[in-house]
């Protein structure tokens, strides 16, 4: 009986937590690769708010993106 309640509890918890996860959107617009070239996502406009693409996606990802564009890193 206790084992069955435990299984039901775990299943219920799993169902409830599936609604709390990733919804397919980015937290900040500048995290979306489609927006990385927008002027709002590049310095100096984004620096006061800290939402520059290079800051949000990490240095390694940003460097790889810059290499594919043929741009030298600053």
Image: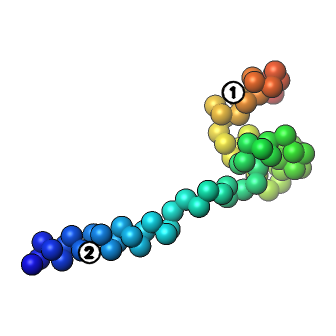
Contact (Cβ within 8 Å) of mark 1 with mark 2: no
User: Which corner quadrant holds the C terminus?
Assistant: top right
What residue is disc 1 on? 64
Residue 9 image-quadrant placement:
bottom left
State whether residue 53 appears in this view. no
What's the distance in space between the residues labelled 1 and 2, CA to CA?
45 Å
Colour scheme of the rendered structure: rainbow
Asked which secondary structure carries label 2, the reply is helix
Give residue 58's position: percent from left, percent from top. Answer: 65, 39
Give residue 35's position: percent from left, percent from top. Answer: 80, 46
Question: How many neighbours does mark 1 have within 10 angstroms: few (below 14), some (14-19), or many (20 or more)?
Answer: few
What residue is disc 2 on? 9
| Looking at the image, residue 33 lies above or below residue 19 | above
Give residue 13's position: percent from left, percent from top. Answer: 34, 72
The nearer-to-camera label among 1 and 2 is 2
Name the residue: 9% across, 78% down.
Answer: 1
């Amino acid at each position: 009986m206790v084992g069955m309640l435990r299984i039901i509890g775990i299943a219920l918890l799993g169902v409830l937590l599936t609604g709390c996860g990733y919804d397919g959107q980015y937290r900040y617009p500048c995290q979306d690769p489609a927006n990385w070239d927008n002027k709002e996502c590049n310095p100096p406009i984004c620096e006061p708010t800290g939402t520059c693409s290079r800051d949000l996606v990490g240095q390694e990802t940003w460097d790889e993106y810059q290499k594919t564009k043929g741009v030298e890193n600053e």
